[in-house]
Amino acid sequence: MPKAILWVDVLAGLGDPMTFYQLTHTLGASSDPDNPGPEEMSRIIEETRTIAVVGLSRDPVKAARRVPSYMAAKGYDVIPVNPHAERLLGRVSYASLDDVPPSIDMVLVFRSSAEAGPIVEQAMEREEEPAIWLTTGVTSPDEVAAARCAGRNVIQDLSIFRVHLVLLD
């Protein structure tokens, strides 16, 4: 990456050059080159307070449980969405995203790519216009493209855990 771009981004508030390098490397792990860049990714993470996690697992070994637990430990209000559980992480679990009360900043999706499209569409219908984040390995090209065309912040095939570690830990 040319130094001029690196220093412009550093001066834009991303911190030291090593943080920028680590974030750029982390973002490059996604198969989607149209995911937001370092500055926008940083803004999304910093402005998020409440996360509805679709597919939050009951199994403490799975990433779909460990990552939301980590985010909760870091101060985020994590709202479980799992129709097979009444409570997760000490919180009421909702059967679907449509059942989650208003006031979420992000929808974090831990479901398969085959199931992600309808979830992206449900997230698009929410009045608060939350960011939509599909975790590593999860993509939904058509629905993500539609959401982006509508001006929504959408990330796919990327670990929020890895991005958070680079930015805020």
Image (tube, rainbow, N blue to C red):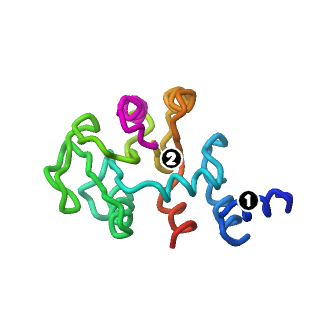
Amino acid type assigned to the residue bearing label 1 in the image:
Asp
Which residue appears at 49% of the width and 57% of the height? Answer: 45
Q: Which residues are magenta?
A: 116-131
Report the residue marked by disc 1.
Answer: 9
Q: Are marks 2 and 1 in contact (CB under 8 Å)?
A: no
Residue 153 in the image, given as x and y percentages of width and height: 52, 41
Label annotation for residue 137: 2
Residue 150 in the image, given as x and y percentages of width and height: 53, 28
Which residue appears at 40% of the width and 29% of the height? Answer: 121
Which residue appears at 43% of the width and 54% of the height? Answer: 48
Which residue appears at 31% of the width and 45% of the height? Answer: 103
Residue 147 in the image, given as x and y percentages of width and height: 50, 30
Residue 151 in the image, given as x and y percentages of width and height: 54, 32
107 over 143 or under it: above or below: below
Which quarter of the rendered picture does the N terminus lie within?
bottom right
Going by the image, does 152 lie left or right of 117?
Answer: right
Q: Quadrant of residue 88?
A: bottom left
